[in-house]
Amino acid sequence: MNSKATIAVMVVLAAAAAGCGESDVKRSVDARTEVLHHFSAEAPVVGLVAPRPAGDLIDLDEAAAEVPIWADLRSKVQAPLRAAGLSPADLRRLTRPQEQIEGIAASALAFGAPTPTDLEAGQSLLVLATDQDELFEELLAKGVDSGDLQPAGSLDEATLYSNSIASYAERDGVLVSAPSLGVVRSAVARRDGDSDEQLDEDVVNAALGKLQERGPLAVYGQAPQLLGEPDVERLFSDASWIESAADAAASVQAVAGTAEIEVVVNLERDLEPAERPLEQEPQPLRLAVSALGSLNGVGSASSDEIRLQLTAP
């Protein structure tokens, strides 16, 4: 089986992306948990960006400048924020923690397809969680005054906005954005609904925990949900092992001026040696993938997982 199908897992993950206790505040203490709870339990793909330390994200932006899909993803994340009147300086202020608590993320950003239906329809969701609720309200009010945003009502204490680029909801320092107001409303309702219908942070963290390192960009994908997509079926038509894939995690970070990509695909059943796409010992890989450019690195496959460590020059 060709290793190109294996690296396509990362392509699909990246290309598709483009509460504790009770109180009056309707958000989780940890921002990483908060953003995930806006996505459904069946979310096909979710990218997680760690805004802090900012230097890691800046280094990745420079290292991945020549990676085709990075520019596309960056544009999809930045466009709705800029359209809301939020400048880079505003975002730095918003993601600066009011109080630093060890082990707790004060800010986090997630983007991706909230449900399989949204993936099929090309609908994406962006959620930015901060602990700067008053500042967020102030900045969005300025957006209304400047004409960047138009009020669009409210939903369960969340204030809704829209413009020609996207729709938004803000509550308790959390901004939810999507091209469609319907997707935004659904995300807010999901966050306030049955926790079993929300993407489980423990499941995501378990997958990401198998990565050797976690960079400023991490991606989580559920293979069963992605396999229904025509492009995915085409990519994996000759890969019998993919039917055994449970989920996958990827991390992207800058190392010595280059973008390093680590991918782990978790399998639901043990693969026999003849079924594995790669040898158990790491072997050199040299791939050319249109969305990621030329990739060099190593890959290996055991009975229950597939690992790739790649560099985009």
Image (cartoon, rainbow, N blue to C red):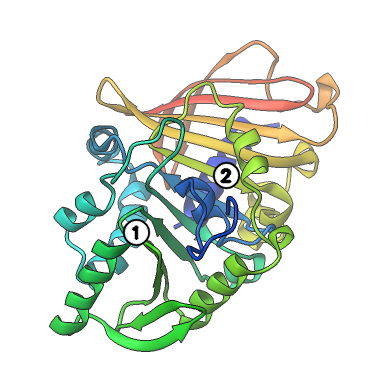
Determine contact: label 1, label 2, CB under 8 Å: no
Q: Which residue is outermost to the top?
A: 281
Q: Confirm whether residue 239 shows in the render.
A: no
Q: Position of residue 151 (x, y in %)?
A: 32, 87
Q: Position of residue 96 (x, y in %)?
A: 25, 45
Q: Residue flagged by tag 2: what amino acid is it?
A: Tyr
Inter-mark Cα distance, 1 to 2: 17 Å
The residue under the point 35% across, 81% down is: 161
The residue under the point 57% across, 76% down is: 186
Give the SS element for disc 2: strand
User: Image quarter for residue 141?
Assistant: bottom left
**In-front residue for pair 276/247:** 247
Crowding at dot 2, Cα within 10 Å, few <14 / some 14-19 / many 20+, comes out as many
Looking at the image, is 223 positioned above or below residue 258?
Answer: below
The residue under the point 36% across, 77% down is: 166
Q: Position of residue 32 (x, y in %)?
A: 49, 46
**In-front residue for pair 20/60:** 20
Q: Residue flagged by tag 1: what amino acid is it?
A: Val
Give the SS element for disc 1: helix
Read off the residue under disc 1: 77
Dot placed on the residue nearer the N-terminal end, 1 or 2? 1
Looking at the image, is 174 positioned above or below residue 102?
Answer: below
**In-front residue for pair 76/149:** 149
The residue under the point 39% across, 57% down is: 128
Read off the residue under disc 2: 220
**In-front residue for pair 275/245:** 245
112 to the left or right of 87: right
Numbered-mark total: 2
45 to the left or right of 56: right
Residue 107 got which mark?
none
> Looking at the rendering, in which quadrant would you find the C terminus?
top left
Crowding at dot 1, Cα within 10 Å, few <14 / some 14-19 / many 20+, comes out as many
